[in-house]
Image (spheres, grey):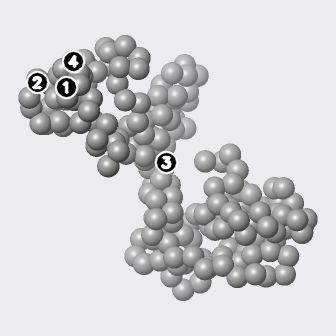
Amino acid sequence: MKRLALFAILLSASPAFADQMTGTAGQMPGMTMDHAAQMAMPPGAMPQEGGQAAFAAIHEIVDMLAADPNTDWSKVDIEALRQHLIDMDNVTLRASVTAEDVAGGMRFLATGDGATVGSIRRMVAAHAKTMNGVGGWSYTTEDIPNGAALTVAVADPSDLAKVKALGFIGVLALGSHH
């Protein structure tokens, strides 16, 4: 709602912004967009958010790759990134998670329906493989009906409070692999 309100304020407060976003003053936003004119606007003249988080993330990565003259385009797979972002969305917003205390750690049971099941299994397995051993934490996974279980064991007992505070999604967000 805040973005829509900001967009409405910008349209009403700036005729130049309105013309750039609509193509001609008075048309409904989004009906016509003059991307060439938008690209010619000075930095800061346009909102920086891409309008949708996954699209914005892809846009940022594409811009970074395009700006690097050493990009090896034969190794770029933007569709794989898009699929991963779909998995991230499914797990973040559609998975149901319960947590259990286990000796030296926590066990998270993540379940879902439809496509969310595959997303959970892929995300949990990939995260456990990438992060196992980092910071003295060990990760084990197993498929369960409609999802996956992730067990996080800590070497330092004082880390247990951190695992509990992070919960399932916080644990998945750890690391710079995203």
Q: Earlier in the sequence, mark 2 or mark 1?
A: 1
Q: Amino acid at mark 3?
A: Leu
Expressed as whole percent of the image width and height from the top left, the position of residue 119 reads 50, 67
Question: Which residue bears the numbered disc 4?
Answer: 16
Expressed as whole percent of the image width and height from the top left, the position of residue 53 reads 42, 46
What number of labels is visible?
A: 4
5 to 108, vertically: above or below: above
Q: Quadrant of residue 174?
A: bottom right
Q: Amino acid at mark 2?
A: Ala
State how far apart marks 1 and 4 are (Cα).
5 Å
- The local crowd at label 1, few if under 14, some if 14 to 19, many if 20 or more residues have their Cα within 10 Å, is many
State how far apart marks 4 and 3 are (Cα).
35 Å
Expressed as whole percent of the image width and height from the top left, the position of residue 88 reads 51, 58
State how far apart marks 3 and 1 are (Cα).
33 Å
Which secondary structure lies at badge 4? Answer: helix
Q: Are marks 1 and 4 in contact (CB under 8 Å)?
A: yes
Q: Earlier in the sequence, mark 4 or mark 3?
A: 4
Question: Which residue bears the numbered disc 3?
Answer: 81
Camera-nearest label, 4 or 3: 4
| Badge number at residue 25 | 2
Q: Residue at x 42, y 71 (%)?
A: 115
Q: Earlier in the sequence, mark 2 or mark 3?
A: 2
Which secondary structure lies at badge 3? Answer: helix
Q: Amino acid at mark 4?
A: Ala
| Badge number at residue 18 | 1
Q: Residue most toward the left? A: 26
Q: Amino acid at mark 1?
A: Ala
State how far apart marks 2 and 4 are (Cα).
9 Å
Q: Nearer the viewer, residue 53 or 36?
A: 53
Which secondary structure lies at badge 1? Answer: helix
Q: Are marks 2 and 1 in contact (CB under 8 Å)?
A: yes
